[in-house]
Amino acid sequence: MGLPTDAIIDQSWARSLSRFAGGRTVRYWINDQARTLDDGTRAEAISRSEATFIRQTMAEVDALTGLKLVEKKWPRNTDIDLYRVADYRQKGLLGETTRYRGWFEITWEDRGGNQVTKDERWTITHEIGHVFGLDHPYGQPYSGRYDTSTRSCRTTSRRIRVSHARMWPHSRSSGVRPEGSRQAPRPKVT
């Protein structure tokens, strides 16, 4: 079942990232030690293989969007903080993205120890997508009407560029128009 681009875009999250970043550079940090998060969840150090995968994913987002994604060594003045957790209190939860007043926090459940599993790759990519304004179909993550399994969540680079152009209209890829549209609406980014 195909979905219109508007069905998977959350403009408020895209505007938040733009506001947090204050420009074209988005700063992210990868947790490298055990710590307790604000909600009491115990985070573990992200492994080298997971960190490598995150860096590769951020480089792909950088190339697709025209934003400049920069890894920081410390979690100060960052826009995105990434954490691996041993487990969630909520059964069945694999990953979560939380929007705070000045940054996003991405967490995912450890399933492979120091190796990054296929499920973790999908979950990390999925959660990073939320930060950049991609949403569940019509904002309904638990709807039985849409298959959000890992098999169906593949998105082509063109569709990402189209979605990005609608969320970040002043980037290098903003010349891409949504399929079936003569002129992409240009949302105000604040």
Image (cartoon, rainbow, N blue to C red):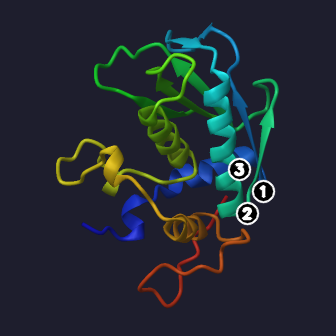
- In what element is the residue under mark 2? loop
State whether residue 102 appears in this view: no
Residue at the spot x=52%, y=49% of the render?
A: 129
- In what element is the residue under mark 3? helix
Number of numbered markers: 3
Q: Which residue is mark 3?
A: 59
Q: CA distance from mark 1 to mark 3?
A: 14 Å
Q: Nearer the viewer, mark 1 or mark 3?
A: 3
Q: Earlier in the sequence, mark 1 or mark 3?
A: 1
Tag shown at residue 153:
none
Residue at the spot x=52%, y=66% of the render?
A: 163
Mark 2 and mark 3 residues within 8 Å of each other at the beta carbon: no
Q: Which residue is mark 1?
A: 24
Tag shown at residue 66:
2
Image vertical order of residue 104 relative to residue 173, above or below: above
The image quadrant where one finds the C terminus is bottom right
Residue at the spot x=41%, y=86% of the render?
A: 180
Amino acid at circle 3: Ala
Amino acid at circle 2: Gly
Mark 1 and mark 2 residues within 8 Å of each other at the beta carbon: yes
The image quadrant where one finds the N terminus is bottom left
Q: Residue furthest bottom?
A: 182
